[in-house]
């Protein structure tokens, strides 16, 4: 993974909304699962953008 991709991923994590952060720490498995899926989608998008920019 190159530095540009790492920077994009870090940016996604830094900008994660508070509801996402709260739900990642939630005891409710359904809330946690939704937050994990949302974060995964955000990361996939950032990685795709990074790869597209590199092409």
Image (cartoon, grey):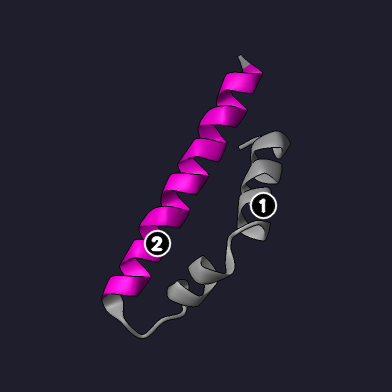
> Tag 2: Cα neighbours inside 10 Å, few (<14), some, or many (≥20)?
some
Q: Are marks 2 and 1 in contact (CB under 8 Å)?
A: no
Residue 17 is situated, as x and y percent measured from the top left of the image, at: 58, 63
> Tag 1: Cα neighbours inside 10 Å, few (<14), some, or many (≥20)?
some
Q: Where is 16 relative to 4, above or below?
A: below
Residue drawn at x 36%, y 85% is 27
Task: Specify the quadrant that holds the C terminus.
Answer: top right
Q: Secondary structure at mark 1?
A: helix
Asked whether, in this view, residue 21 is left or right of residue 31, the answer is: right
- Identify the residue under disc 2: 36
Task: Specify the quadrant that holds the N terminus.
Answer: top right
Residue drawn at x 27%, y 72% is 30
Residue 28 is situated, as x and y percent measured from the top left of the image, at: 31, 82
Q: Secondary structure at mark 2?
A: helix
Segment colored magenta: 30-54
Residue 24 is situated, as x and y percent measured from the top left of the image, at: 45, 72
- Identify the residue under disc 1: 10
- Residue 50 has which mark? none
Separation (CA) of disc 2 from disc 1: 16 Å
Residue drawn at x 44%, y 74% is 23
Q: Nearer the viewer, residue 4 or 13?
A: 13
Asked whether, in this view, residue 3 is left or right of residue 35, the answer is: right
Q: Where is 33 relative to 1, above or below?
A: below
Q: Where is 3 relative to 36, above or below?
A: above
Q: Where is 49 relative to 3, above or below?
A: above
């Amino acid at each position: 993974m190159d530095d540009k991709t790492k920077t994009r991923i870090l940016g996604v994590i830094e900008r994660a909304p508070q509801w996402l952060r709260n739900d990642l720490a939630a005891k409710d498995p359904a809330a946690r699962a939704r937050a994990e899926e949302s974060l995964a989608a955000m990361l996939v998008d950032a990685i795709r953008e990074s790869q597209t920019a590199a092409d």
